[in-house]
Amino acid sequence: MSASSKTEDLVCNFSRFYILTILYEAPQHGYSILSTFKDRTGKEISPSLVYPFLRQLEKKYLVTRSLKPVGEKKKKVFELTPKGAELCEKLFKRFSALVSVAIESSLTTCASCGCKIFEGAHKETVNGKENAFCCIHCARSYKKDQIRNGESFRSQLNCKDDNLIFTL
């Protein structure tokens, strides 16, 4: 098997996984699956991949197909069966470990609560250092703690002002 053939199989398998993900979110008709796939991935998927895959899922009792009104037309709507939803949940658990490894380097840790932040961290400078926070509430809490800790430190030194001068 050539390298390009293996890559096509990989993309094909990812596409199938993604089709299952779309169906897990809600029942869909075929064109809706094609559109959702393109909207989210920026790539078109061939109907010659989608429809045979849906038939395979139906034969294995992982999806059901029914005619339902969509606008003025009736369309074949595919819905995961409980067995299909269970399969998706198992796949999601397996896939989540891979995703965790892939995004770990992109995560930032909230300076206050320690939660992981993927994007859009709230940033503030506290004591001359830029810190990332998951929300403004954590930033406010962190600043209060820093003030409390600073006052505690000054009281231990019997200092009355913020201008601490140390000489060696």
Image (tube, helix red, strand yellow):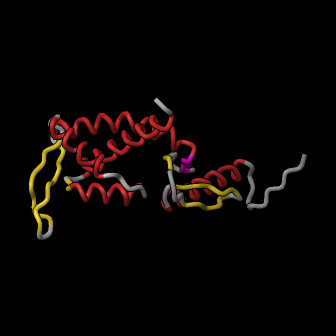
Where residue 156 appears, as percent x and y from the top left, is 70, 47
Where residue 29 appears, as percent x and y from the top left, is 20, 56
Examine the structure image and report whether residue 100 is included in the region drawn in magenta.
no
Q: Residue at x 34, y 55 (%)?
A: 37
Q: Quadrant of residue 162?
A: bottom right
> Which of these two is toward me, 25 or 47?
47
Q: Residue at x 51, y 41 (%)?
A: 102
Query: Residue reaching furthest bottom?
Result: 72
Examine the structure image and report whether residue 108 is included in the region drawn in magenta.
yes
Query: Residue reaching furthest front?
Result: 2
Q: Which residues are magenta?
A: 106-110
Where residue 12 appears, as percent x and y from the top left, is 37, 42
> Which of these two is toward me, 25 or 66?
66
Q: Left or right: where does residue 81 sit relative to residue 157?
A: left
Q: Left or right: where does residue 43 sit relative to residue 147?
A: left
Rendered view: 77 above or below 9: below
Rendered view: 48 above or below 39: above
